[in-house]
Amino acid sequence: MKKRVLAIAALVLCAGIAAAQSEDAEFAFFKRTIAPVMRWGENGIITVPKATTLGKANFFLGIMGQPAGTLQGLDLYTTSLSLMAGTSDDVELGYTRRQVVWEDFMLSNLSMDSFHLKARFLNFGDYLLPQAAIGVNAVSLRDNKFESRNDILFNPYLSVTSTIPIFTPKILFSATAVAETIMNENELGTYMFSGGVDLSLFNFLYAFAELQGFNPKVDSNEVLNLGAKLRLGFVSLGVALFNISLDTAETDNLIDQYASSLVDLSNANYIATLAFDIRLGKKAQTR
């Protein structure tokens, strides 16, 4: 059994393992395990949540899959299905079901449910001035049962997003910063930071980049995720490359660290998404 399969099984069955290792690149892996399949570039980047929301009475269905290693000569895949709804202009709810499947589409006994809530509390407008939202992802640590608060792992976060039109509102550049932690049994874990940018071209083609697992106070192994999305009406198709490791230089200057960092693709893998929009209400305010 490959190490990647063991890691996925451990995270699916007991997310607490990832919580204990959240000061390094495992935090990014853990975040992808509990994050919803978002509407890339609109209410999220890839796995980094944006402060923008779906909009009142709008629904979103997203499906995601990625390779998960090989066991006894058969390939394994991690799949996710998320259903999200905008209950108001500033609040969205979501549910995600994750399932590890065999290459012949038979279901394994590895699965996980998670629930999501995001509420925007600051909105100065569509462009330039930032929007801010708080949110939480919740996953059960005991048999997928959400019966006791102490058996639920919470991932609270604060997200700030600013969107800038480039010459025209049809070309939008967006930057997002997120501070988050892990909470269980009323105890908070180490604070981690993530960020990302996305570029929307005529609401048709999107490009993304995000950095996960950054903490200026501790040694951390950040990972870089890159992706692109093509949108045709209410259907969108996306592909991303995850777990791109960054070997940063030894310097006190953060800009110099990342400017001289080396990219390692040895642990990177691809992920694909298929998403459907059901727009029954107003559009999300920032597009």
Image (cartoon, grey):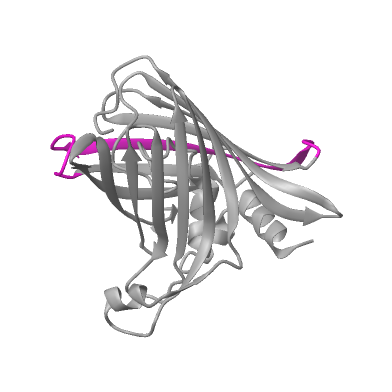
Residue found at the very far front of the displayed protein:
167
Magenta-drawn segment: 104-130
Please report the residue visible at 47 percent of the width from the left and 49 percent of the height from the top.
227
Name the quadrant of the C terminus. Answer: top left
Task: From the viewer's perspective, tell me whether residue 255 is left or right of residue 99.
Answer: left
Task: From the viewer's perspective, tell me whether residue 92 is left or right of residue 241.
Answer: left
Whether residue 58 is visible here, answered yes or no, is yes
x, y percent for residue 154: 44, 48
Q: Is residue 215 above or below residue 158?
A: below
Please report the residue visible at 35 percent of the width from the left and 53 percent of the height from the top.
196
Q: Quadrant of residue 109?
A: top right
Q: Is residue 113 in the magenta section?
A: yes
Whether residue 29 is visible here, answered yes or no, is no
Q: Is residue 220 above or below residue 66?
A: below
Front position in the image: 35 or 40: 40
Q: Is residue 21 above or below residue 197?
A: below
Name the quadrant of the N terminus. Answer: bottom right
x, y percent for residue 268: 58, 61
Please report the residue visible at 29 percent of the width from the left and 27 percent of the height from the top.
284
Task: From the viewer's perspective, tell me whether residue 84 is left or right of residue 72.
Answer: left
Q: Quadrant of residue 167?
A: top left
Residue found at the very far right of the displayed protein:
72
Q: Give the main secondary structure, helix, strand or loop, of the magenta stretch.
A: strand
